[in-house]
Image (cartoon, helix red, strand yellow):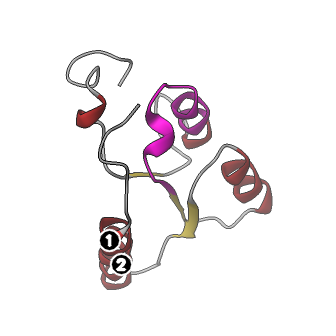
Amino acid sequence: MCGEEPYSDPKQLPRLLITDLKMPRMNGLELLKWLRGQAHSGLIPTIVLRASGQYSDIKEAYRLAANSYLIKPTNYQDLVKAMKLIVGYWGLCARPTALP
């Protein structure tokens, strides 16, 4: 998404981003910080889904403009339900039709 094709066109940006904090190359907090520094990415709803509810992680995620921080369900069926709710909710939210 560094402005390279196809993401140089704001219409091609993701409609929703769900991230964890522990990832191999860049952790989720680094991703949030980078993402919010990009021109059009402020319009991408960004959700942190994490097994831990550590206060410092939650506080930092919101400070970096995460839209939500959810504790990951412990079993598969509940995870599927949570994903359906997340995608359903953000799918209903109004968004600008033309990005600046």
Residue 68 lies in quadrant = bottom right
Indicate whether 75 appears above or below 71.
below
Q: Position of residue 64 (x, y in %)?
A: 67, 43
In the rendering, at what x and y percent does residue 26 appear?
A: 51, 31
Judge left or right: residue 22 versus residue 98. Answer: right
Are the residues flagged by discs 1 and 2 in contact, CB closer than 8 Å? no
Q: Which residue in the structure is indicated by mark 1?
A: 92
Q: Under tag 2, what secondary structure?
A: helix
In the image, what residue type sits under mark 2? Leu
Q: Residue at x 21, y 18 (%)?
A: 5
Spatial distance from mark 1 to mark 2, Cα to Cα? Answer: 11 Å
Q: Which residue is mark 2?
A: 85
Residue found at x 51% / y 40%: 42
Of the 4 image quadrants, the one containing the C terminus is top left
Tag count = 2
Q: Quadrant of residue 34?
A: top right
Residue located 47% across and 28% down the image: 25
Amino acid type shown at disc 1: Leu
Give how far across and how far down residue 24 sits, in percent: 46, 34
Task: Count neighbours of disc 2 (C-alpha within 10 A) and say few if under 14, some if 14 to 19, many if 20 or more.
Answer: few
Q: Is residue 53 left or right of residue 49?
A: right
Please state which of residues 4 and 69 is positioned toward the viewer in this rendering. Answer: 4
Residue plotted at (49% across, 70% down): 72
- Reply above or below: 46 against 75: above
Q: Nearer the viewer, residue 21 or 63?
A: 63
Which of the two discs, 1 and 2, labels the residue nearer the N terminus? 2
Q: Under tag 1, what secondary structure?
A: helix
Toward which corner of the image does residue 76 lie, by quadrant? bottom left
Residue 29, above or below 5: below
The quadrant in which the N terminus is found is top left
Look at the image and give the residue range highlighted in magenta.
30-47
